[in-house]
């Protein structure tokens, strides 16, 4: 799940939990909204953990190129 899908789930869940006043037999719309918000937040956290920039270790070795070979001189 990407960042966009997670934010979308959070937004839809917030709308269902806080803005909709509709009764469905056997279904609580606000609970569905809360569940969507939690799933969206978990998806956002997981996406950030997976795609977070990782610390890269730089090696002490540097490559030196022979420019005479590269340019034919």
Image (spheres, rainbow, N blue to C red):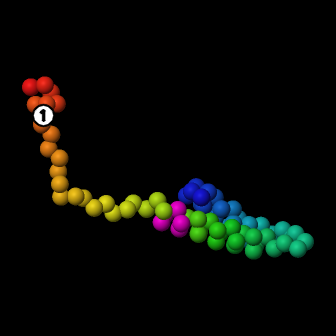
Q: Is residue 34 left or right of residue 72?
A: right
Mark 1 crowdedness (10 Å alpha carbons): few <14, some 14-19, many ≥20: few
- Under tag 1, what secondary structure? helix
Q: Which portion, as a residue range, is magenta? A: 45-49
Q: Is residue 55 visible?
A: yes
Instruction: Residue at 74% x, 66% y: name it.
Output: 16
Horizontal and vertical percent position of residue 9:
65, 62
Quadrant in which residue 65 is drawn: top left
Instruction: Residue at 22% x, 58% y: name it.
Output: 59
Q: Is residue 21 left or right of residue 63?
A: right
Indicate whether residue 52 is drawn in magenta. Answer: no
Quadrant in which residue 25 is drawn: bottom right
Horizontal and vertical percent position of residue 6:
60, 61
Instruction: Residue at 48% x, 66% y: name it.
Output: 49
Q: Nearer the viewer, residue 49 or 68?
A: 68
Q: Is residue 31 left or right of residue 10?
A: right
Residue farthest to the front?
69
Quadrant in which residue 14 is drawn: bottom right
Eyeballing the image, is 37 above or below 62? below
Q: Is residue 19 visible?
A: no
Horizontal and vertical percent position of residue 35:
70, 71
User: For the stretch drawn in magenta, what is the main secondary structure?
Assistant: helix
Q: Nearer the viewer, residue 71 or 24?
A: 71
Which residue is labeled 1 in the image? 67
Indicate whether residue 46 is drawn in magenta. Answer: yes
Instruction: Residue at 18% x, 58% y: name it.
Output: 60
């Amino acid at each position: 799940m990407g960042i966009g899908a997670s934010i979308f789930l959070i937004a839809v869940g917030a709308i269902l939990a806080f803005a909709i006043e509709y009764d469905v037999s056997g279904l609580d719309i606000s609970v569905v909204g809360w569940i969507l918000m939690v799933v969206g937040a978990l998806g956002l956290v997981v996406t950030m953990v997976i795609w977070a920039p990782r610390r890269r270790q730089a090696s002490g070795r540097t490559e030196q190129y022979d420019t005479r070979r590269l340019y034919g001189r």
